[in-house]
Amino acid sequence: MTETDVMRAIEKKLLWLACWMIHNANHLRAKDEIKVGGHQASSASMVTIMTALYFSALRPQDRVAVKPHASPVFHAMQYLMGNQSRENLENFRGYGGAQSYPSRTKDVDDVDFSTGSVGLGVAITAFASMVQDYLKARDWTAPRDDGRMIALVGDAELDEGNIYECLQEGWKHGLRNTWWIIDYNRQSLDGVVHEGLYTRITDIFRAFGWDVQMLKYGVLQRAAFDRPGGARLRAWIDACPNAVYSALTFQGGAAWRTRLMNDLGDQGDITRLIDSYSDADLAELMENLGGHCMETLAEAFAAVDHDRPVAFIAYTVKGWGTPLAGHKDNHAGLMTQAQMTEFRDTMGIRAGHEWDHFEGLDVPEKDLKTFLAKVPFFAKGPRRFRAERVAVPDLDPPGDATLSTQAAFGKLLDAMAKGDSELADRIVTTSPDVTVSTNLGPWVNRRGLFAREDIPDTFRDERVPSTQKWRFSPEGQHLELGIAEMNLFLLLGAAGLSHGLFAERLIPIGTLYDPFVSRGLDALNYACYQDARFLLIGTPSGVSLASEGGAHQSIASPLIGMSQDGLAAFEPAFADELAAIMHWSFDYLQRDGEGDPDERTWLRDETGGSVYLRLSTRPVEQPGLGMTEARRQGIIDGAYWLRAPGPNCEAVIVYQGTVATEAIAAAGRVGPDRRDIGVLAVTSADRLNAGWHSAQRQRAKGNKAAVSHIESLLAPVPREATLVTVIDGHPATLSWIGGVKGHPTLSLGVEHFGQTGTVADLYHHFGIDADAIVAALHRLSCGRPIRLAHS
């Protein structure tokens, strides 16, 4: 019994389990109209590749992003190895069962990278390799062998633009130890891919320095090519259109014979070659593409003797080994009950034994168990690591009387760079070509840029004066990126998983222009879905960036911060608020506790997560309030009273962010005409809103004592009092606050693209200046007329 025989038995078992899992899911939930046909065909095309990879080529330090529709094969493989339960497989796509697409946070079976949003699972492997190189250069990293970061890629995924952005970034950074194995089945969801795509793929990969391995022919085909007439057969295969090859695969051996004889018959050697095969053997020969040949795959993987990135283009047939093989509609196709019964019989599976580990296999169970126990990749068990939390030192705010939050961020980070704390050593910063303009420059000057080899600062060496002292070295702590925001979030995602992937804690900080958060939103969501941990700085923000015009003035980003799961969003107005938030954030990024809500806020803070800070370039006068423990806690919880309402309060001004100046000015002007006015400083509409909804859910479950932070803050405000909310962003960010206690509310904000001008011009145009706040209170509240003009 050879190793190849054993691996073919495993391949057969994985194909059966994957198809049965999908059939079972659809059969059990037929009334729900759940259809998972694409998994059946796509899983089948990947089964040989995954068998050869996991049971021959991989080592424990390797990491894999599995093609989304190959999830049943992945789950079946983990089930075979004892890392997944039968209950979860029987409940595939059901509540609490094995996930439709491999999920790092929802599945139990050692998923390295979540996939599902096509293309992102591919690209993150390259950034994980960069993070691995970064860690290897640190003196606090335990010595270990380099792992290969591997993506199993659908050929249709190569339509995704983020893949090509990633290729360019990888080339800049000297990408290593990255394999992309492309399932080249030439079928996408809607049809067959364009002819000659592989030539474009190879040209692009080679242009960026990748080793391209074309796995087109299996051992049966190569043996046939060596026989008389074989060269003609190979030429026919190479010239055959994708659609024709797929259609003939579906039709089977007789159709292959008819087409080959029509095209090549009556020509001596080639005719005798075709006639030497039965219909069944001819079909097997023509389907023996490189991606379905165990020997071809194992040899190709084992032959790589360098650390350059490798693209394997593995020719396959979508639906291989099933009745759906090759059909254009097989992405949505499912085997009928009759087809499944016939398939089960062909596989040698007895009814009632569908889930048995070794049912239907020719290899003795003892031999299989012995082999599985020695598979290197699984030998050390699950590879989800943990890393110790790093202590967070005190973070004192800058003492400037007037300062923007963006400048304060730069000063706070620079102060950390001057120190020698472990936290500062664990910080890695990155930015998409806006390092200086987002105030990361001082940090980079002190801590340097990262590269695996020293690259001198030419301007400094040539004695050209520059404020930037930028030298690349293995000790650097800034990863320079090009302008693609998708790459930023993919790198933050990879670095933010460092503790779980590589057992080393990193504190990633990424900065970008706030309006361009939307450019990389898919990758941001993807990073949060994996529970990656990072600090995101969006700056400058809003129409406060007055001179730059509408394309650079963010509107929706506060709502993105509120709606994005796994991301706590803040928008401080003052430097001391920012310092308190950053101090808390560095600890929050490292938390990994239970999800029980904190009864003070009803937020699940112990679970931790990532943090998004929306900052501004607009300098504002600092309030000099002093940092009491109550104020600090309010800043973290989402809001505090900048001016507490009196017992006869008639109006409250609620603000978030840099428009604090306008709110404070308006409160001063309204004071003589409205009693006991309050000013509520909101630092996080996200956390306030989340706590409010959480408390409501608790009350619905019977906990009448559940009260959120915003409810506690508004409790002393009379029901008839008027609320005016204001933000340099979409007004819906704060408009919900009126519904907490039923106060009459008018919400001011920005709903349309801005333009160039002064801050005063734009604040007046959009109605978020002090005059607009005063006018809103005048219209909405009862009492004597408010003096609208400046006194």
Image (cartoon, grey):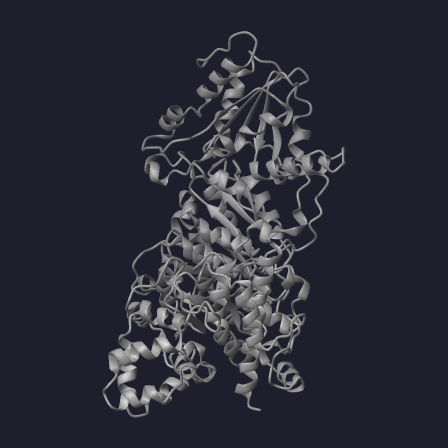
> In front: 565, or 430?
565
Where residue 695 sits: x, y (%)? 69, 36
Residue with the most extreme left position: 267
> In front: 183, or 787?
183
Residue 669, placed above or below residue 568: above
Circle count? 0
425 left or right, relative to 381: left
The residue positioned 61% from the left and 79% from the top of the image is 360
80 left or right, relative to 128: right
Where residue 198 sits: x, y (%)? 31, 70
- Which image quarter: residue 541? top left
Residue 296, placed above or below residue 248: below
Where residue 244 sits: x, y (%)? 32, 69
- Which image quarter: residue 568? top right
Residue 76, placed above or below residue 702: below
- Asked whether residue 225 appears in the rendered view, the answer is no
- Asked whether residue 236 appears in the rendered view, the answer is yes
Where residue 531 sits: x, y (%)? 57, 55
Which quarter of the figure is the N terminus placed in? Answer: bottom right
- Which image quarter: residue 759? top left
The residue positioned 64% from the left and 32% from the top of the image is 710
